[in-house]
Image: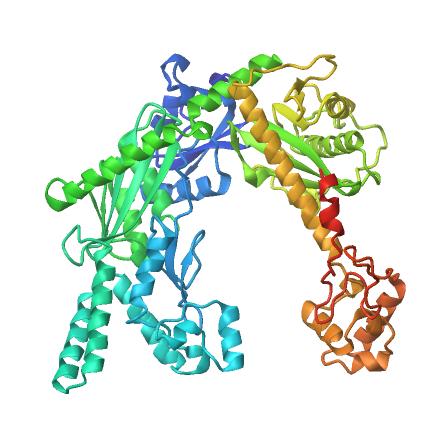
Amino acid sequence: MADPSSYRPRPGEIPDSPGVYRFRDEHRRVIYVGKAKSLRQRLANYFQDLAGLHPRTRSMVTTAASVEWTVVSTEVEALQLEYSWIKEFDPRFNVKYRDDKSYPYLAVTMNEDFPRVQVMRGHKKKGVRYFGPYAHAWAIRDTVDLMLRVFPVRTCSAGVFKNAARTGRPCLLGYIGKCSAPCVERISAEDHRELAEEFCDFMAGRTGTYLRRLERQMADAAEEMEYERAARLRDDIGALKKAMEKNAVVLADATDADLIAVAEDELEAAVQIFHVRGGRVRGQRGWVTDKVEEITTGALVEHALQQLYGEETGDAVPREVLVPALPDPVEPVQEWLTGRRGSNVSLRVPQRGDKKALMETVERNAQQALVLHKTKRASDLTTRSRALEEISDALELDSAPLRIECYDISHLQGDDVVASMVVFEDGLARKSEYRRFQIKGFAGQDDVRSMHEVITRRFRRYLAEKERTGEWTDGEEPGAEPGAQADPGTAAAGLAEPPASTLTEDDGRPKRFAYPPQLVVVDGGAPQVAAAQRALDELGIDDIAVCGLAKRLEEVWLPGDDDPVVLPRTSEGLYLLQRIRDEAHRFAITYQRAKRAKRFRSSPLDDVPGLGDTRKQALIKHFGSLKRLRSATIEQICDVPGIGRKTAETIVAALAQAVPGGPAVNTATGEIMDDTEEPGQQTGSPGEPVSTGAPDERRGQER
């Protein structure tokens, strides 16, 4: 635990101007980012008597080892820089709203030649129009189904679209009038795009124009005695009105606004947002966060605005944003929102009328969300803290293990041996720091030896990074023998480590193996724990605790102890260790299965440089099988479109070096399959395996 006075800046050193500051821990990792109108006054608040600080603020300043700042010219620039750094460094002590679900959006892919209406989740893509978010995907689909009567926009996938264009026959929606069938040129690309634009306009709230136009067309059709067309238009009007009824009018027509409400207690805060477009509630979402310091409602609102609009521009930022309390000061935030939208944005607290009543509804939703969140065991801050304290007491650690790393070995009867490393901080998974390893030091099945190799490789990288940043002053890596060569297997599969020169020294982001844990957990019993401890001892690391969790009886093993530590079955600490161990097992076995599947799909053609999937498929399609391709001459291979003589020579050389496999056997019947096909190859597609049933039979031996 650091003393804040040890890194407190000297009097007069901090400028009295707007800026953004960063607290770093002893490993140079950014743990907190903040902004201030006056850096001098704001930072002075952190270096007062520890007893007067908020508990989470006290934990932050005692974890930190240094503070630095950047001066900016305006408070708006400070707001923008703070948001950028929080996104970049992901500081553990900053307010970060955790979205409890991935909300679905109604998306129109205006970036395609033939725009498509679909349900999307996750990150937004450029050129796509989004509406929502919605609470349920089925609600979007019901609305779209009603609107396709009037706006028959394409909804099919790219594969279905291409297949329809190839066969000249549209899908079912094209036959029943719910798609204009641009795939078979029933409508031109320009007309279809105009139809998609009208769909977007209607979803954006401009509904009156289309309803009046349809009603006028219905009246004209009736006067001309085209009663069938008039009846169809009547049904279209009914469908649009029914779609509109799904979102009741809550504010005056044409009102575009977002309403943000906050419910909070001493430890956490919940935020709810209602998106109102065209006077109707078009979407709803919510977030929950830990209160990492003593913070006002206005500051919580400011953080919510940053997260909500930090990546948005244009109409995605509404003209009006209603909040329960204004940030202090409000002018920089309002100016920032105006810049994101490109026109004036009103940020205010509703005082009376319909907007005040709707805000009360949003506040009730926020209160319910906070209560529901409190009942979720894994996300409850109090429960997580108790779990870490129980682990600390049971293992006799000096402090609660805020960072825990867990390792697991996975293989299939000694093949494709891999390992996983998962990271939990403050009792929550930090998936961005998960790592995967291939076991390269030996072949075969040996979990103990594999664990020793993985721990050695991980912490050798940590020591190398520690030496590079100057934390070692003797110039020698602890645990390294004189003249020892670097471990050839330090890179995780598919995640090759960059050279030390490419790692920015002053970059506060966590690098691959640069940040040490307080506790290492291994999946296994006494042998695996002994191997992990031996690896740390050989490297000279003595400040990291090690334990193992055995699956059979859920016993916790410590290095050198003959008897395990038995935690109560109702212990929150045991529950957390089980979750970490199970996550490491899931991550390892997923990687192992992916490697096995890739090996089954491998082909000698994969080793030919410059030969992509398209030309591989052309070769297999031309010759029918890999065996026939192997027996072909260079001239015959040159007859394949896209294959030149130099490439043909390379293919012949690669196939000559590859050893042909044995005949494929059907394990269900025992018969030998057609020898014109080689095992692992299938006519028409290179590299696809012929299923023999063996992998499924062996899955029982997988760990």
In the depicted structure, whether residue 331 falls above or below residue 520: below
Outermost residue, left side: 353
Q: Quadrant of residue 146?
A: bottom left
Q: Quadrant of residue 26?
A: top right
Drawn side of residue 204 relative to residue 639, left or right: left
Image-based side of 304 in relation to 321, left or right: right
Q: Position of residue 330 (x, y in %)?
A: 24, 40
* Residue 9 visible here: no
Q: Nearer the viewer, residue 169 or 485?
A: 169
Report how many numbered discs are placed on residues in the image. Answer: 0
Camera-nearest residue between 580 and 682: 682
Give the colouring mode of the picture: rainbow
Q: Is residue 331 visible?
A: yes
Quarter of the image with the C terminus is: top right
Between 223 and 369, which is closer to the camera in this rendering?
A: 223
| Whole-percent x, y for residue 359 in the image | 20, 41
Relative to the observer, which residue lies in front, 125 or 153?
A: 153
Residue that sits furthest to the front in the current view: 669
In the figure, is residue 490 to the left or right of 656? left
**Residue ID at (72%, 81%):** 641
Question: How far from the left and from the top, in percent, is residue 428?
Answer: 51, 31
Q: Is residue 614 above or below residue 529?
A: below
At x 34% / y 71%, what residue is drawn?
196
Q: Position of residue 325 (x, y in %)?
A: 22, 35
Residue located at (34% from left, 51% from top): 133
